[in-house]
Amino acid sequence: MSDLGGLGRRIAGRREALGLTREELAQRAGVAEAYLGHLEDQSESTLREAAAKLAQALDTTVAELLGEAPSGAGGAAPGAELAELDEGEALGLIAPGGVGRIAYEGRFGPTVLPVNYRVAGGAIVFRTTLGGSTDADLRTGLAGVEYKVAFEVDRIEEDTRTGWSVLVQGALHHVTDEELAEARATGVEPWAGGDRRQYLRITPSRVTGRRIATG
């Protein structure tokens, strides 16, 4: 979902945090003060109403125009090629962290869930709720025995119809109290918020990736 009024709120919030007036920020950025005010004052309803009119004129949908439609709905770009990534390239792409998807065999069958993650020491670290699905479903109950899971991260550029995907496979480890300080040092924070004190770590045993590029 798009955060329609978010840009204006974030601009205004950062400007105020820096103690700048609109005039000062406009001068610093080299934009018209009136334009800056327009960005800051736009509400979600105003932007969506404008998007509806523009979408009709452009023979498209509001969802497509606002980036709310599922990614990859169109066809391939001219000259598109699919290339395999080596392990170093794949790990480099996911190194900044962000949102990925963990896949595993849960109590109700094959399960795929999005999580916010960080990479530290070559491992993928994320947080979950104690007793939640990614916690309870992935405990073997046997000391030293861990489930193998898959973890996927991708990026799609709709405008250029290019992108990449990385697949990590490896054992999932429940971080112990003795290991907690190291896991916390990654700074990973779940987008969903809440009491997500259980840290999980995936140690890769196989890393593959693919990139869609145009010639």
Image (cartoon, rainbow, N blue to C red):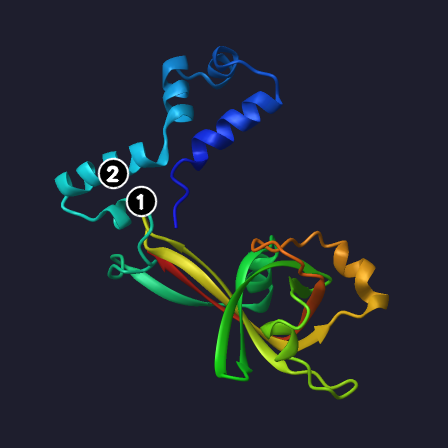
Of labels 1 and 2, earlier in sequence is: 2
Query: How many other residues sit within 10 Å of disc 1, few (<14), some (14-19) or many (≥20)?
Result: some
Q: Is residue 68 above or below residue 120?
A: above
Q: CA distance from mark 1 to mark 2?
A: 7 Å
The residue at the point 50 percent across, 68 percent down is: 209
Question: Which amino acid does the dot numbered 1 rest on?
Answer: Leu
Residue 27 lies, in percent from the top left, at: 48, 12
Q: Residue at x 14, y 42 (%)?
A: 56
Query: SS of the residue at dot 1?
Result: helix
140 to 35, vertically: above or below:
below
Residue assigned mark 1: 66
Residue drawn at x 30%, y 32% as measured from the top left: 46
Name the residue at the bottom extreme: 142
Outermost residue, right side: 178
Q: Does residue 136 lie above or below 90 as drawn?
A: below
Please provide percent x and percent y for residue 117: 61, 59
In the displayed structure image, the side of residue 83 where residue 183 appears, left or right: right
Residue 215 screen position, x and y as percent: 33, 56
Q: Quadrant of residue 13?
A: top right
Vertical placement of 61 versus 31: above or below? Answer: below
Where disc 2 sits, the SS reads helix
Q: Is disc 1 in contact with disc 2, using a CB cutoff of under 8 Å? A: yes
**Residue 141, picture quadrant:** bottom right
Label 2: how many Cα within 10 Å (few below 14, some 14–19, many 20+): some
Rendering coords of residue 84 (x, y %): 46, 69
Residue 183 in the figure: left or right of residue 37: right
Residue at the (36%, 28%) spot, across then down:
42
Please state which amino acid type lies under the numbered disc 2.
Answer: Ala
Specify the label residue 46 is tagged with. Answer: none
Residue 37 figure quarter: top left
The residue that label 2 is drawn on is 51
